[in-house]
């Protein structure tokens, strides 16, 4: 189980780090507006929140990829078993 968690969490961590770098190169955290209100948070807080949000999104995408791969592999194995 730990191996599967690392297959999901490590690539999503790397992708989130790259995504935060790109995102906050283009967007200034002090100028963010949420629901019509200026966001009153420090740059570090916005960077941290942005990282964890992107990490969660990337983790879901990575987990879905692992699930679909496992599903397609089990279907392929069962088809090979039925053909023989």
Image (cartoon, rainbow, N blue to C red):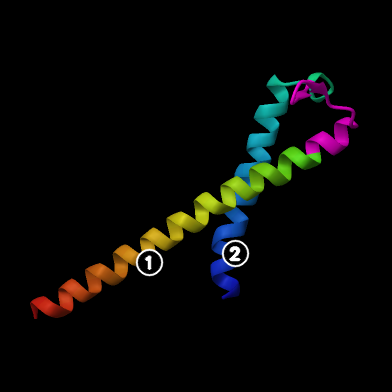
User: Foreground mark, 1 or 2?
Assistant: 1
Q: Residue at x 38, y 66 (%)?
A: 70
Q: Residues within 10 Å of mark 1 (few under 14, many from 20)?
A: few
Q: Check disc 1 and report its element: helix, strand or loop.
A: helix
Answer above or below: position of 45 versus 23.
below
Q: Residue at x 55, y 52 (%)?
A: 60
Is residue 24 covered in magenta? no
User: Along the line of sight, which residue is nearer the eye, 69 or 42?
Assistant: 42
User: Along the line of sight, which residue is nearer the eye, 7 or 61?
Assistant: 61
Q: Residues within 10 Å of mark 2 (few under 14, many from 20)?
A: few
Whole-angstrom CA distance, mark 1 to mark 2, is: 15 Å
Point out residue 2 in the picture as x, y percentages from the top left corner.
60, 73
Is residue 36 covered in magenta? yes
The residue at which mark 1 appears reads as 70
Answer above or below: position of 52 versus 66.
above
Q: Residue at x 34, y 66 (%)?
A: 71
Q: Residue at x 30, y 71 (%)?
A: 74
Point out residue 51 in the picture as x, y percentages from the top left corner.
72, 42
Answer above or below: position of 40 versus 72.
above
Query: In the rendered structure, which segment of residues is drawn in magenta?
Result: 32-47
Q: Earlier in the sequence, mark 1 or mark 2?
A: 2
Point out residue 48 in the picture as x, y percentages from the top left corner.
80, 41
Point out residue 84 in the picture as x, y percentages from the top left corner.
9, 81
The residue at which mark 2 appears reads as 6
Answer above or below: position of 36 versus 79.
above
């Amino acid at each position: 189980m730990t191996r599967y968690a690392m297959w999901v969490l490590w690539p999503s961590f790397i992708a989130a780090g790259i995504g935060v770098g790109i995102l906050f190169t283009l967007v200034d955290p002090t100028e963010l507006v949420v629901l019509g209100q200026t966001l009153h948070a420090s740059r570090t807080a916005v960077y941290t929140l942005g990282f964890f949000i992107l990490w969660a999104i990337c983790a879901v995408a990575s987990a879905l990829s692992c699930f679909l791969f496992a599903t397609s592999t089990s279907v392929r194995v069962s088809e090979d078993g039925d053909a023989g």
